[in-house]
Structure formats: C-alpha cells, structure tokens
Amino acid sequence: MKKCDEIRQAGRADLPAVLRLYGQSELDNGAVLTQAAAEAIFTRMECYPDYRLYVAVSAGQIVGTFALLIMDNLGHMGAPSGLMEDVAVDPACQGQGIGREMVEHAIGLCRQKSCYKLALSANLKRGRAHAFYESLGLTRHGYSFRIDLQ
C-alpha cells in the first residue's frame, strides 16, 4: 500500500520544505542552509545532466526528500551508476514506509537509466538507518573513505 501520494522532482518552491526536513537534529546537528544558499545550489544542480532533488508528498505535504545523481562511467563497460544522497523523512512520518518508497523510486530511476548499481552512504552513528537500508535489500559493500576538507 502506497504511503506517498507521489514522489516527484522538486522545484524551487519546494526548497523551504526540504530545508525543514534537513533541519532534523540527526542530520548536520540541525544546521541548514539559508534559502538563498539553497537556491544557488539548486540552480547549479539543474546544470548537471542527471542530478535531481526529489520530494515525497503525502496529503499535500512534503514528508521526505532525497537527491539522486546518475553518473556516466568509463569503467564498468560504460554503464552508469547512481548515487543517492541527502535522504530525509519527516520525523513524524518515519516508520510508515515513506523512506522505503523513496529508495524503491530511486532504484527504479536507476534501472530506467541502465545503471549497474545504486550506492548510498550513512554515517556510522546512524544504526537505525543501516538496519533500514539492509531491510530493503541493500548490502554493505567495501569501505567508505573520506577526508574532511573544512
């Protein structure tokens, strides 16, 4: 049974609701971009061939969001890959299947583009998120490495 009325590409008018979702203390300790900064980044995202922000809508309200980048590759015989980022569900709506629908939607978009994989990462401290992603059939693969530059 569907929990979202729709999952669609976000527009500029959706940014305040998206920023509200990103204001959760579990993500960036509650810090969010200003509206102006978010609009500037959204404009840059629109310049990429296949980098989009999506929103999940239920009862007319934005209750979830994620970004999806589909990258071209020279390896893997030219098959593209998907990278899902910035996944957030309204805390009042968590546990209702909205996150599941968003991940399934992203998987479907990647399949349409013939991606060989969809990858995402979740901070080590987010154990509930790890269990959630594993319940959807995603598997832990390799190691994620990073260097903080700021």
Image: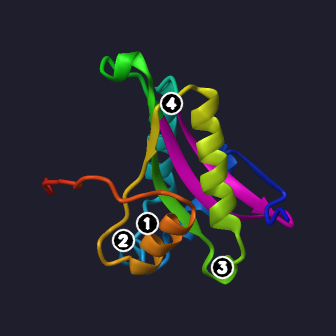
Q: Magenta segment: does it hold 65?
A: yes
Compute the Cα span from label 2 to label 4. Answer: 29 Å
Report the residue marked by disc 1: 32
Which of marks 4 and 3 precedes in the sequence?
A: 3
Bounds of the magenta span? 51-69
Query: Eyeballing the image, is 95 above or below 47?
Result: below
Give the image location of residue 61, x and y in percent: 78, 65
Compute the Cα span from label 3 to label 1. Answer: 24 Å
Report the residue marked by disc 4: 115
Residue 95, disc? 3
Give the secondary structure at mark 4.
loop
Instruction: Assign the C terminus to one quadrant of the image.
Output: bottom left
Give the secondary structure at mark 3.
loop
Compute the Cα span from label 4 to label 1. Answer: 31 Å
Query: Eyeballing the image, is 146 above or below 45?
Result: below
Instruction: Assign the N terminus to one quadrant of the image.
Output: bottom right
